[in-house]
Image (cartoon, rainbow, N blue to C red):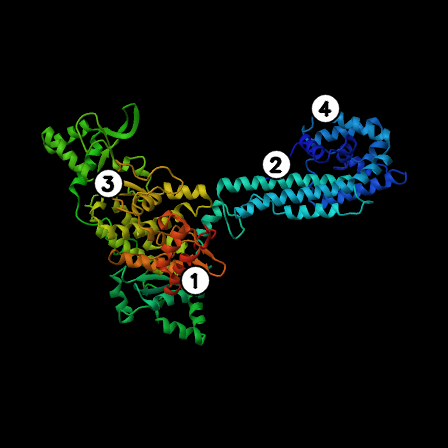
Amino acid sequence: MEKEASPKENITSLVDAQDLDKDTLALQKDQGEPSKESTGGPKLDNDGGEDVLIDKSARSRDVKSKDGGKNLDNNPSHGDIGGKIDESRDLESKVQDKELDSDKGQKDTAHKVESKEQEEKLHKDGLHDSLGRKADESKDLESKNEEETNQTTDEILGEEEEQEPVFDGNEIPGMAANRSMSTRSLDLDSENQGVVEKAVALKNLVKVKGVVVVSTFLRRLSGKRDEDGDAENKAAQREEVTEGRAQAIAIKGRIILYTRLGCQDCKETRLFFYRKKLPYVEINIDVYPSRKLELEKFAGSYAVPKVFFNEILIGGLSELKGLDESGKLNEKIEYLIREAPSSEAPLPPLSGEDDLSNSGAIDELALLARKMKEFVDVKDRFHKMRRFTNCFSGSEAVDFLSEDQYLEREEAIEFGRKLASKLFFQNVLEENLFEDGNHLYRFLDDDPIVSQCQNIPRGIIDVKPKPILEIASRLRFLYFAILEAYVSEDGKHVDYRSIHGSEEFARYMRIVEELQRVEVKDMNREERLAFFINLYNMMAIHAILVWGHPAGAIERKRMFGDFNYVVGGSTYSLSAIQNGILRGNQRPPYNLLKPFGAKDKRSLVALPYPEPLIHFALVCGTRSGPALRCYSPGDIDKELMEAARDFLRNGGLFINFDSKVASANKILKCIDFGKNDVEVLKHSSNYLDPAISEALLEFLADSQLKVIYQPYDWGLNC
């Protein structure tokens, strides 16, 4: 942003820069912007200084028009000096009146009086002497101004180069052009050199300083980075999230692709349609098992891939390539463009098809909890000098249970504890499980934090909660299907647009709603590790689809800290999963406290010690992050080691033994890999090629490598 300086600030800058006397200052102001009267006013007839002055005024107008009227916007407009010398006092008054209108009250009365006195002094001393003296000073002023401008700009920009500067929308795109034009104006020979050009140079100096400093401050404050040099606003980022694929061909018909998990020909068929820009609907017979019978009916077998253009069976990958090579594929595409699918064509997956979410036996306790919620008085209450929203007292709950279940009061208290253990409600201060009296309790979906979670369903689910291992298995299966259908084979590029509109993602949202009352403590280390890694990666995709890709540090902090799921009655953010669960409740960077306190029940779910390899598995939608994978509890340690090898061998770590420099991804800077660069390199050697690993360890035993961390690319991995 460019902030216009006031006239007094401009004058102060000029005087401080080169200690100009009042005569020069007045001349500069008079040459700033010609008024209408000066344009059509009489010219000076004298030789020498008067003609030079008229020529300089013309040059000043040319420079101003080229610069778009931006270089001298802050200088006061006094009109042409030649016109003022021959004009009468009445004409001067009119010019000053117009000046007051154009300046819009920016100049005060004292400033105008001072300018008028300076003009009279110039008139008395003679323009010839003044201009002659200023022409001699212009050479020194020119070199000093140019030197100071370059020096100041180099200092500021040099400081920014250390911080990896990027264009974030605060710089003015035309600044370089304006700066070069003002430099050319300073290079004119001494005969044609005018004070206006010197004023332009000084003005540009102020602009350069102001714009660069403001840009630097805003960049450091917001943390915005875009290595492509193109600033993006929030709307553009959301559009980028949903743009995944190239613009597809518009067709009336429908392409149905039958696939299954782990099929290489299915992957190549997807890539074929992607290159041809043909939209298709995928039916994975592992995700939709009921469609196997349909496929056998239409194609005669379960073999995949199988492609249908409307009701016409095209075949598999080889048939597609054959049509493309013979040129007949274009005829089929023309048919799809013209003809809509008939009733005999296979249908796309229906919402909820073959979905086991929210299905099962009715939970009698859930029905009772729903009935109790209607009976007790849920409202805001004060307790221990604090105000709690949407809560009820323990005595009210005991009264309801005694009356509804025909229980004695002690029995009703035990029944209430059973409901609380099933996570239907909990104490607002987590002081007890359930007690009679004035203790306050709150239903799970009434909690102000839980209610903001992205997977919380409306109301109480009627069916019994399924075991966490069953839900984790279905999530893993669905996550694998999403990766195969909408993520590139190397795992580095995600088609967010297709994910957002897919039935797989809608099913994922229904599955994660079942997590609100599960027992996470029932999982062992391997099951917990695989479950939370897969959940983290899907949560990050969900966050980008809902909130957009974060543009700077502030938005990233909000995404990692405020995008929550409720799991087992507790809220988990991306940061809580990474640092609280997977890193064994370790402090996040630049934080003083651990994610979970001593009384936090989530600490019981945390792994006993940090798992460094999780940094090669967690993906938050950035280009510098690792590849997306699906992890299973049976082979979790092996899969994490493979992820580490792929990451480090494909750009995560470069070693130049000749120059004794190692270039590492900033992910390796995490303290989990070591307290210093030597420990980081030794840890990384476990996942490099054997020859490189051996050479690295021998080199570290005799000398030391300098580690340079690569700039982290926060751009979206689409």
Q: CA distance from mark 4 to mark 2?
A: 24 Å
Residue type for callout 3: Ile
Residue type for callout 2: Lys
Q: Residue at label 3?
A: 460
Looking at the image, is mark 1 or mark 2 earlier in the sequence? Answer: 2
Residue type for callout 1: Ile
Q: Is residue 43 left or right of residue 544?
A: right
Looking at the image, is mark 1 or mark 4 earlier in the sequence? Answer: 4
Tell me the mark number nearer the camera, choosing from 1 and 2: 2
Mark 4: secondary structure: helix
Residue type for callout 4: Ala
Q: CA distance from mark 2 to mark 3?
A: 56 Å
Q: Residue at label 2?
A: 3
Q: CA distance from mark 4 to mark 3?
A: 74 Å
Q: Residue at label 4?
A: 110
Quarter of the image where one finds residue 395: top left
Looking at the image, is mark 3 or mark 1 earlier in the sequence? Answer: 1
| Other-residue count near label 3 (Cα within 10 Å), few / some / many at <14 / 14–19 / ≥20 | some
| Other-residue count near label 1 (Cα within 10 Å), few / some / many at <14 / 14–19 / ≥20 | some
User: Front-most of 597 and 283?
Assistant: 597
Q: Is residue 192 left or right of residue 707?
A: right
| Other-residue count near label 2 (Cα within 10 Å), few / some / many at <14 / 14–19 / ≥20 | few
Tell me the mark number nearer the camera, choosing from 1 and 4: 4
Report the label total. 4
Q: Quadrant of the C terminus?
A: bottom left
Q: Residue at label 1?
A: 251
User: Front-most of 198 and 326?
Assistant: 198
